[in-house]
Amino acid sequence: MLYIKCPHCGLRSQNEFSYGGDATIKRPELNKEISDQDWDNFVYLRKSPRGKHLELWQHISGCRQWIKVERDTLTHEIFRTFKANEGI
Amino acid sequence: MQKYSVFSLIKNAFNDHKEWKVAWKDPTPKAEYDVVIIGGGGHGLATAYYLAKEHNITNVAIIEKGWIGGGNVGRNTTIIRSNYMHDENGLFSEFGMNLWRNMSQDLNFNVMFSPRGIINLAHSDAQMNAYSRRGNSMRLNGIDAVLLNREEVKKIIPMADFSENVRFPIFGGLMQPSAGTARHDAVAWGYARQADSMGVDIIQNCEVTGFDIANGKILGVRTSKGEIKAKKIGLCVAGSTNILAEKLNITLPIETHLLQACVSEPIKPILDNVVTFGAGHFYCSQSDKGEMVMGGDLDGYNSYAQRGNLPTLQHVLTEGIAMFPFLSKLKMLRTWGGIMDMSMDGSPIIDKTHIEGLYLNCGWCYGGFKATPASGWTFAHTIAQDKPHKLNEGYSLNRFRTGHLIDEKGLGTKTWIS
């Protein structure tokens, strides 16, 4: 069981959360000419590193807020959590 | 190579089994090979075997970080099927079914292929319609498919929950009678033994640490056992694809995720087929030892851990009990996990890359084991001819950019419910 510290609610079990993937991916800017390669990068291509990974989770059965979690993908250790609008 | 047969078994029994030869050698790597395959799992071993057998390329090495067959080929639920709707998947998998049918003879190794049939259960009229469409598509591609109604399903698996007022009543199912299971370790060992006998070097405990590339062309691979030059290199590393991609400075449409499986204590024969739950993600068969072999959803987050977490297992087994209530009485014998190369459309990639001489085989998601022979066969062709075979043309790397996705079930890196 993973225990994730929601920045709004405190430490909760993973059962309350849903996973949202890589948090470093940025959507291409609106109202700008975007190449197919840019869309490919945004929609499909992922580094998926072994080790530290910054990722999005949603506290779906709690405050329903999206949060950022820095987690190790090999050991599952969670280092830090942030509100979605906070940077590293 | 020593031929395995009932006669060699009897002969060796009289010698107290002291005369058996090693099944494959343990060579030190040569300085240079025509082809180096990275990854000594089912797909890598099969690729080396078909390179030697179909293309007469025998100056080949397989390099494996751990031991051969220690990854997903030894961690799956052994299901073999070709019940796909899309032409690319259907034709590819059915080609593989023919290789499965002859594999024990071809490899002179009993892989215990057991075409016991797979039933996908349907729990609504809409799902019956969807299965009817899938079954018709399968039949158009020459794959056997039978649409079963509730009574027909009940005759085959009477132990499923056919009671009234259940959350997901069984409306019927789609059956592929020719699907089945095989002994997964034997597949790895059979391919390894034959490849070795044709001159392929199987180098275990040899980790890749980097690549030598110049002017957009692959020159060789750096390993924990030194540098190895190669004209061509094929990647067959499943869940470790992203780790090697990082060393190659490539970003792929792949995420690495954790998938669990488990077996119950052994019980007397009760289940003759492979059965899947249609209202979630759960599948079940009974092994020859009597264990119920079960699996289902991903754990749901990027992971390289190769061991699972209990919440997902509980979720998957809840679905299992909804389908087969008797499972609740069984003790769990073992659970384990493996890491999957989850592609973004749920279909694999077997293709060349922008680096000359570098070939990619990945993205197998939930279906790597059953694809082993077809994957090896088409990947060997792609490497030998420097272009994809017609069977794996659709499994291109650039299909995500061009929009030619093969979204069989709309399942990519996401779990069934997330």
Image (cartoon, helix red, strand yellow):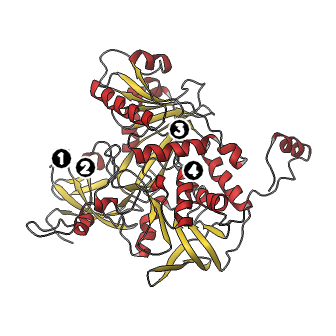
Q: CA distance from mark 4 to mark 2?
A: 39 Å
Residue assigned mark 2: A17
The structure residue drawn at horizontal position 40% and vertical position 31%, both measured from the top left corner, is B135
Query: Which mark is drawn over residue A62?
Result: 1
Determine crowd level at label 1: few under 14, some 14-19, many 20+ residues with C-alpha closer than 10 A: few
Task: Indicate left or right for B73 with B405 as reference.
Answer: right
Q: CA distance from mark 3 to mark 4?
A: 25 Å
Task: Indicate left or right for B392 with B30 as reference.
Answer: left
Q: Could you tell me residue B332's position as x and y percent? A: 51, 36
Residue A50, placed above or below residue B279: below
* Type of amino acid under label 4: Pro
* Type of amino acid under label 3: Val
Determine crowd level at label 2: few under 14, some 14-19, many 20+ residues with C-alpha closer than 10 A: many
Q: Could you tell me residue A76's position as x and y percent? A: 38, 59
Determine crowd level at label 3: few under 14, some 14-19, many 20+ residues with C-alpha closer than 10 A: many
- Evaluate if marks 1 and 3 touch, with contact meaning CB atoms under 8 Å apart: no
Whether residue B71 is visible here, answered yes or no, is no
Residue assigned mark 4: B373
Query: Which mark is drawn over residue B263?
Result: 3
Q: Nearer the viewer, mark 1 or mark 3?
A: 3
Q: CA distance from mark 1 to mark 3?
A: 34 Å
- Evaluate if marks 1 and 4 touch, with contact meaning CB atoms under 8 Å apart: no
- Evaluate if marks 2 and 1 touch, with contact meaning CB atoms under 8 Å apart: yes
